[in-house]
Amino acid sequence: MDELTQDIFEWDILNWSKALDFWTKEIDIKDKNFKCLELGGRRGGLSLWLAMNNNSVICSDLESPEEIAEKLHTKYNCTDKIEYQSICATDIPYENAFDIVVFKSIMGGISGNGQDHLKKQMIDQIYKSLKPNGKLLFAENLESSFIHKGFRKTFIKWGERWNYLKHDEIKHVFSSFDKVKFKTVGFFGTFGRSESQRNFLSKLDNVVTKVVPKSKRYILFGVAEKTNV
């Protein structure tokens, strides 16, 4: 796995980076000078990917991620393509503004402690912020199996409050979009306690994912398109 991909995804890289393959098959972002927004971009990995493909990006989080994310962006000499803002994903102060909005693994935190309505509110706000024909590129944790739920509550410090997206919620949560394509992957990777363990388990996922029910996989990624309205 190359260093750039590691810097973009950081954690369980082999499984999560499959989102990048999916996105690039659905949309060409190279040298398009798209106006883009990353939500929940504390470390700015997805902003980095967009900027390195010559797009202008707002890298945002609930509090401005500049102090942390700028270090990564400086490493790749792309700070001229990126600005930093404080933006709440459930109240985005833009309308018909972006060609691309992107996020990874933020929905469960935003809707924490059972605030299910905030999942759809977030997606509806993203829809509002996109230009006609704009696209949302998303990657999110799914609730997965009872084994995953028990493991997260025991070993992940925020696992108790995190409100994982359920497979049967997907259609409702993304219902503001007319076109949604998505894929689910991964089962074992999340159980690794180090990146080397996750790397090994993710390779195992490559073998067994096809026999794991879609509703029991733990990563969802896809593309949602706002039609020309």
Image: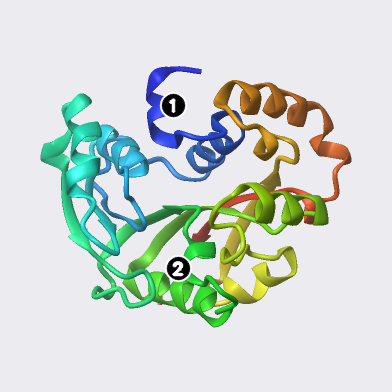
Q: Nearer the viewer, mark 1 or mark 2?
A: 1
Asked whether 50 or 179 is in front, the reply is 50
**89 to the left or right of 171:** left
Q: Residue 207 is drawn in which quadrant? A: top right
Label 2 secondary element: loop
Asked whether 107 or 162 is in front, the reply is 162
Residue closest to the far top: 2
* Percent position of residue 5, x then y: 43, 27
Tell me what residue is drawn at x 35 percent, y 39 percent: 45
Q: Establish if 159 lies above or below 203.
A: below
Which residue is the site of mark 1?
Answer: 6
Residue closest to the far left: 80
Asked whether 179 or 60 is in front, the reply is 60
Q: Establish if 16 lies above or below 59.
A: above
For marks 1 and 2 on the same chain, the one whose residue lies earlier in the sequence: 1
Which residue is the site of mark 2?
Answer: 226
Q: Establish if 160 lies above or below 31.
A: below
Badge 1 crowding class, 10 Å Cα cut-off, few under 14, some 14 to 19, many 20 or more, is some
Residue 103, which numbered label? none
In the rendered image, which quarter contains the C terminus?
bottom left
Tell me what residue is drawn at x 25 percent, y 38 percent: 51
* Percent position of residue 125, x then y: 39, 75
* Percent position of residue 187, x then y: 75, 41
The amino acid at mark 1 is Gln
Q: Residue 194 is drawn in which quadrant? A: top right
* Percent position of residue 177, x then y: 53, 71
**92 to the left or right of 148:** left
Label 1 secondary element: helix
The amino acid at mark 2 is Lys
Q: Establish if 68 lies above or below 98.
A: above
Badge 2 crowding class, 10 Å Cα cut-off, few under 14, some 14 to 19, many 20 or more, is many
Asked whether 103 or 33 is in front, the reply is 103
